Image (cartoon, coloured by chain):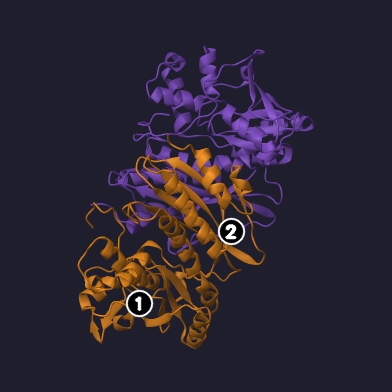
Chain colours: A purple, B orange
Amino acid sequence: VPLDELAIIDRFFRPLAGEGAFRLLDDAGLLEIPSGGDIVVTTDMIAKNVHFLADDPPAAIASKALRVNLSDLAAKGATPLSYVLSLGLDASVDEAWLSAFADGLRGDQQRFGITLLGGDTISVPEGPVISIAAFGIVPRGRMVHRSGGKPGDALYVSGAIGSATAGLALLKREAGPWNALLAAERETLVQCYRIPEPRTELAVTLVEFAAAAMDVSDGLVGDCDKLCAASGCSALIEAESVPLPPALTDIDEAILARLITAGDDYEILAAVPPHNEAGFRGAAEAVGVAVTRVGTLTEGSGPAQVMVDGRPLPLNSRAYVHRGSDERP
Amino acid sequence: VPLDELAIIDRFFRPLAGEGAFRLLDDAGLLEIPSGGDIVVTTDMIAKNVHFLADDPPAAIASKALRVNLSDLAAKGATPLSYVLSLGLDASVDEAWLSAFADGLRGDQQRFGITLLGGDTISVPEGPVISIAAFGIVPRGRMVHRSGGKPGDALYVSGAIGSATAGLALLKREAGPWNALLAAERETLVQCYRIPEPRTELAVTLVEFAAAAMDVSDGLVGDCDKLCAASGCSALIEAESVPLPPALTDIDEAILARLITAGDDYEILAAVPPHNEAGFRGAAEAVGVAVTRVGTLTEGSGPAQVMVDGRPLPLNSRAYVHRGSDERP
């Protein structure tokens, strides 16, 4: 017997509703707005076999759906407040799946201090398809844009680049240096693919010290190109300085090129003016987020120049396109 | 050659972006908030063969995706401001479809005075799947809830009930009194199914005169039950007074029962205290929205009593469940 929408809401989602959600018993929610701030809004949709795998744990799918949005908010300097959830389910979803999915949301709500403001649950021909819109607050007039960078600004990334790519390659049993890793190291990389780590703690630091920022979701190089285009400049990326997954030690240039052009990092790329670099590094360290300088914004326009040890790094592509597993790029 | 996400955004959606959307060139948008108001948020997802038919005109699908959200806002007394769009597309979608879909959004943006604040376009295994979150403003503290009704309040509906049901029956070639209609009358009913008419003009009237309201999307009777549950009372619906599609004249009790328990009306059900009835009717007339008294909130609890000419009206079900066309209820 398929669950009906009201039963699903009642059992699994009502317990997640917070202030302004009216226990999900109304047509809409009220967005509570702390004084003195601007409201930042983002939305992302994820689908089976495109952004997650059919047998990924439901709690991880829920976390990913939420966290890709929180990553966007963090990149804009916004602290998350609440979110709305649209959930498209097919007949393969059962109570156990829904219960685990809700558990994933609950854990992240507690961790990030947010609540569910509203939602919709529908039947779809093939699912799950999950769309979330998330709301955050940034001090008035201080949203961090992609467009604020200037030539001479230092380029920083948070965390490591390429962990999710290695994790997905492991899940797909692709050959690569990740196969030489210990089981625990492999599991860590798989977790990076399944459950990104939004850099919410870095939001306030970005507001204070960054001239421009974005989240890295479709490959560092291609996303850097987007920041350059928005800021009206170009960039030099020094690929040897890009922080990679620490367990991966034996990386040739082809793998390096792949890791810095593939998706699902959900790290922050920030342009930091030279006079702010010391402050940025200190503030990031204080909130426990590793940041690494990977290059510089440069005069001119067009895609970033990607160098390794002073030579151009050959790249097959610059950005990652999320597609269904049965589609050819 | 499948279109890539950036090309789709550039060609079809960037022209729809408004204030705070930063030309869809950033990770997120800024929600502009007029002073003195509360922000109402709602989200609805629609999918092929569940909420629309595969060969429905793309502009109509876009309008439906948007308008089901605007209907929720109107029912809360909120005037729409902006929206975010998540669009899941499969390989069957081409440029002509996207162009027509964007045209549908553009027309409604102009009509309802709203703009696109952000979005996401992804591949899905089977689409289209469309999720919209819409934002509206209501005077501070004045959102109209489902829960404000009291015994003795008059129950009103806007427009007519059952037009979309008759339109869907025509599209599905089901036998019924709609088959006797003229071609133009049939087309009107089909349009009611494809493109609902959100009662945005009624929002201010609801704030001023209604004690409770909701939008009728899953059948008048079942939705009235929800308003009763939220308000802690019951109701009497006088089915003979429910406004039906004017062209449908020869309606027996079975069809009447179906029309008032089926979905996609997107009309407003409002509970109006007796001392506000004259004001409510006058204000609704002033903004050109027909409203009709269909019953009364009553003491007690539990589902509404549905009578016709003083006798109970037999009902096979009370509410409509949106399912895929290949599923059995």
State the mark number for residue B234.
1
Quadrant of the frame with the C terminus of chain B: bottom left
Mark 1 residue type: Ser
- Residue A32 is marked as 2
- Chain letter of mark 1 equals B
Q: Which mark is residue B18?
A: none
Residue drawn at (39%, 48%), measured in percent from left and top? B129
Vertical placement of A183 versus A271: above or below? Answer: above
> Could you tell me residue B130's position as x and y percent?
42, 50
Q: Of residues B243 and B139, which is closer to you in this image?
A: B243
**Which image quarter holds the N terminus of chain B?**
top left
Q: Amino acid at mark 2?
A: Glu
Q: Name the spot of residue B70 as percent of width and height, x first.
A: 48, 63
Q: CA distance from mark 2 to mark 1?
A: 31 Å
Q: Residue B43, how many percent across, how many down? A: 46, 56
> Residue drawn 46% across and 74% down?
B212
